Structures are given as structure tokens and as C-alpha cells.
Image (cartoon, helix red, strand yellow):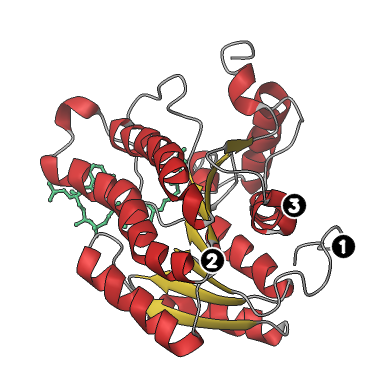
Amino acid sequence: MTDTAVFRPGLLAGQVAVITGGGTGIGFGIAELLAQLGAHVVLASRKPAHLDPAVEKIRNAGGSASAVAVDVRDADRVKTMVDSVQSEHGRIDILVNNAAGNFYAPSETLSANAWKSVIEIDLYGTFFCSQAVAPIMRQSGGGRIINISMTLHYRGWPQMAHATAAKAGIDALTRTLAMEWAPHGIRVNAIAPGPIPTEGVRKAFTPPPNSEGVVDLFAEERAMSAYAKRAIPLGRWGSPADIANMVAFLVSPAGDWITGSIMVVDGGEWLSRGQSN
Ligand code: HXC
């Protein structure tokens, strides 16, 4: 559970937030905090059954949450999902475009479909969801859109052509939509998270089994701790709460004069790349 002491209780009371990919990882951390601050959170995902435990966890903590099915790659389904949230709750104040797909793969052999999958989930999904909520936010005098980006495209990242291209596109969309929709009171910003030890990242740090078939789990911890000391100036890995805190700030009244910004929340990692490796 996030320490919300820095934010006023009830800060987001009465607001409705849609979080794509909100069932796990960073998306869940964001949903948890926005719910703690009083918003009703709608977790949107391809497989809503996967969201049930997340919804239950938020409700058990006293928050208000629901799940909806959507594949963000499908503009018509996104529109239907957004319309259903609007008719059930009467408003959408916050959209967090968090859903993303990813895997390491060499560019020379990346299939057309693999490229398309990631570009469509990350970039098309962000655009379709933003486009669908804009008229609703406009009608109510404004809203906040937060796009989850990354830092790997600032310098390039081998075997991530699809994801880095998509996230660079998301940065461009953030600035363009911010300009286009500022007259409607819609603030559009992005957050570029640094390394957050999700399950996939942890796997990358897990050593192979030894000759007796035993995996040294302490070695994973040591490797992760060594990476944090070597590559992250602030000396620790990030957590979903680090990203959620930035979302809460941006959607609060404190974010009123911020639009078109890309907030890097990474313990200084991307700046130090190349100096420490
Ligand atoms: C090469 C791969 C592949 C891999 C899938 N493909 N995984 N190619 N290496 N590891 C190819 C498939 O062969 C197929 O191409 C095409 O991609 C589509 O695969 P499907 O499984 O049919 O697609 P789909 O079900 O739509 O799944 C989308 C996905 C999947 C992106 C491929 O991984 C996914 O749904 N991921 C969601 C969860 C996720 O990845 N979260 C990570 C977010 S973390 P062919 O040609 O065979 O048809 C994050 C932080 C990044 O974003 C930090 C990075 C360090």
C-alpha cells in the first residue's frame, strides 16, 4: 500500500479514472493510489477476469473500483468501453494510458506481426483511448490524460525497435494533444518510468540453475542490488508507488499549469547511462 500522507485524503473524491492495463505492475500501483485518494477507478484490460483480484484488493482497502474488457488496439471497442464508463458513472476525469506490450527481439528477424502488435498496443492504444475520452472531458470542462512512456528511446535500446519507436510516438502525441486540447481544459502529460522490478525484469536477473538444478535466489537479489548501485544514481530500484505519486501530483490541482510535459521518474538512471556501464 502506498504511503499517501503527502496527498490530502479525499483529494480525488467524486472523480472517475480509467487506467488501461490497471490490473498489474505500474498500472495497479496507479489505480491503488488514485482509489485511496477517493477516485472511482476503472481497470481496463483485454482479459477482465485477470482484473478481478485487483478490483477486490482495492475494494478490500476501502476503495471503489470496477473492471472493463477492452483491447486498446481496436478503436471501435475502445469507444464502446469509454461510452459504457460514461453512461455508468456520468463522467471521466482521468485517463492513464498504461497498457503496453514488450519483448526483446532482434530487429533483423522481427516479424511484421510482432512489430504491429507492439506499435498497436502502445501507440495506437494511447491515441484511441485519448481520442475516445476527449469529447467527454471537453463537455465537462476538462480532464487529465497521463501517458506512460519510457526513457529507452532517448539514446536507443537494442532489440527494442518496436517499443522504442512506439514510445517516441507517444511522447510526440503527448505534446501535440496537449497543444490541441489545452483550449478544452484537457491537460496531457507523460511519465517516463525508470527500472521498476516487475516479474519480467526480475527474471532477467535470475541466474540459471547450477549443476544440481538449484537456482540461487540470493544471486538474483545480489545482481539486482549491484545494478542499482552501479547504474542508478539514487541507488535503488523504482516501485509502482514512485510512478503513482507522480500521477497523483499531475492529476491534482497542483498540476493545473502543466501540460505537454514528459516527467522522467527514474532515480537518474538514463542520465547516467554510458557513464557507469
Ligand atoms: C519475437 C515475438 C515475441 C518474442 C511475441 N512475438 N513474443 N516475437 N520475440 N519474445 C510475436 C509473435 O510471434 C507474433 O508474431 C506477434 O509477436 C504477436 O504475438 P501474439 O502473442 O499473437 O500477440 P498478442 O497476443 O497480441 O500479444 C502481444 C504481445 C504480448 C506484445 C506480443 O507480449 C503481450 O500481450 N504483452 C503484454 C504484457 C507485456 O508485455 N507487458 C510488458 C509491459 S512492460 P508472428 O509473426 O509469429 O505472428 C514495459 C516496460 C518496458 O513495457 C521495459 C523494457 C526494459
Which residue is found at the position 40% from the left and 25% from the top?
157
The answer to whether 31 is drawn above or below residue 275 in the figure is below
Q: Which residue in the rendered view is the most extreme toward the bottom? A: 88
Within 10 Å of the Cα at label 3, are there few (<14), some (14-19), or many (20+) other Cα atoms? few
Residue type, numbered disc 1: Ala
- Residue 141's quadrant in the figure? bottom right
Tag in front: 3 or 1: 3
Q: Secondary structure at mark 1?
A: loop
Among the two numbered marks 3 and 1 on one chain, the one whose residue lies closer to the N terminus: 1
Determine if residue 194 is in view. no
Q: Position of residue 241 (x, y in %)?
A: 69, 55
Query: What amino acid type is highlighted by mark number 3?
Result: Ala
User: Which badge, 1 or 2, is on the more N-terminal residue?
Assistant: 1
Disc 1 C-beta below 8 A from ligand 1:
no
Q: Residue furthest left?
A: 112
Q: In the figure, is residue 219 to the left or right of 91?
A: right
User: Label 2's element?
Assistant: loop
- Frontmost of labels 2 and 3 is 2
Q: Residue furthest top?
A: 275
The residue carrying mark 1 is 5
- Residue 173 rendering spot, x and y as whole percentages: 38, 41
Residue 119 drawn above or below residue 19 = above
Which residue is under mark 3? Answer: 254
Write down the residue under mark 2.
141
Residue 7 position in % (x across, y down) = 82, 61
Which label lies toward us, 1 or 2?
2
Q: Nearer the viewer, residue 96 or 101?
A: 96
Q: What's the distance in space between the residues labelled 3 and 1, CA to CA?
A: 16 Å
Tell me where residue 52 appears, x and y as whole percent. 49, 82
Residue 67 numbered tag:
none
- Above or below residue 255? Residue 15 is below
Q: Give the distance between the C-alpha atoms of the residues marked 1 and 2, in whole angstroms.
A: 29 Å
